[in-house]
Image (cartoon, rainbow, N blue to C red):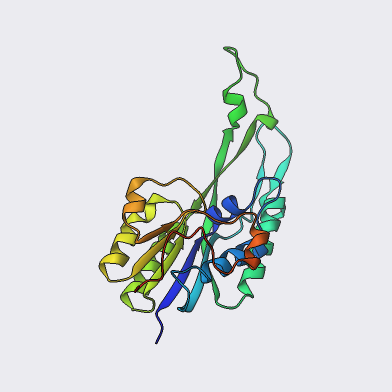
Amino acid sequence: MPPVYAILLDGGFVRRKLGSSRTPAGAGEICALTEWLSVLPCTAGMRLHRIYFYDAKLLEEIARIPLSDEVIDFGSSAAASHNRQIQSALIQRPFYALRFGELLHEGWRLRKRVLHKPGPRIEIGADDIEPSIRQKGVDMRIGLDIASLTLKKQVQVIVLVTADSDFVPAMKFARREGAQLVLVTLGHGLRMGLREHADLVIEDFPLPPTRVRSIRSPAQSTGVPFGE
């Protein structure tokens, strides 16, 4: 039997790295990324167990904007609509499993541009504030799945797409239990501790993502098939 691997995608990180503020990444780019990962030398010839995509449930809340009589409907925003489309599309894709945390609206904060205004006194208006939104529970679900996949011996290789050093304990646990950990950073900078606890780090990604489907033997991979 060939070795089995799973792909774990930190959804917020993947969307930021594959897209931009003007052209946010969609389900097509995310699927193209996983296709590219499946033909890397370190996964070639292995059997895919599942692709886990971790994201937050949409914030369905209406809040009054301070210093204004207007309200904001978070559930109808352009960002929420885009994320809704991504989640709906990925749910229907083969081998994809979505894991959800939640978004919390924790009040309001000054925009960064306001903090850099000169002068001892600054007039603040409704346009100078923005909602403070925090994601909760996503990192915990990634860590739990790494532990579960490892302890149950469901996979021998975990491909983790992130650059968050919070996952170091889960990565260390997986390696201690005999799994091999491939860290894919999509060109993002890494802290040394994160690099230290991966068996293989793949930093480059052939952007733009539309090129991915034509790639069969990615030269930018720094690894070789496991077992060789």
Nearest the eye: 186 or 13: 186
**What is the x, y in percent for residue 95?**
55, 77
In the depicted structure, whether residue 211 falls above or below residue 166: below
- Quarter of the figure with the C terminus: bottom left
Q: Quadrant of residue 63?
A: top right
The N terminus lies in which quarter of the figure? bottom left
Q: How many marks?
A: 0
Query: Is any part of residue 13 visible from this angle?
Result: yes
> Where is residue 89 shown, x and y percent of the image?
66, 69
Residue 153, position as x, y percentages in the image: 34, 78
Q: Residue 214: give x, y in percent of width and height.
A: 65, 67
Asked whether 45 or 5 is in front, the reply is: 45
Residue at 41%, 47% in the rendered image: 190
In which quadrant of the rendered view does residue 83 lie? bottom right
Residue under the image location 67 percent in, 45 percent down: 21
Image check: 155 left or right of 74?
left
Q: Measuring 38% from the left and 60% from the top, which residue is drawn there?
A: 200
Q: Looking at this view, name the residue that lies furthest to the bottom.
A: 1
Question: Along the horizontal axis of the image, is 70 left or right of 94?
Answer: right
Residue at left offset 41%, top offset 71%:
225
Using residue 75 as the reference point, say whether residue 161 is left or right of it.
left
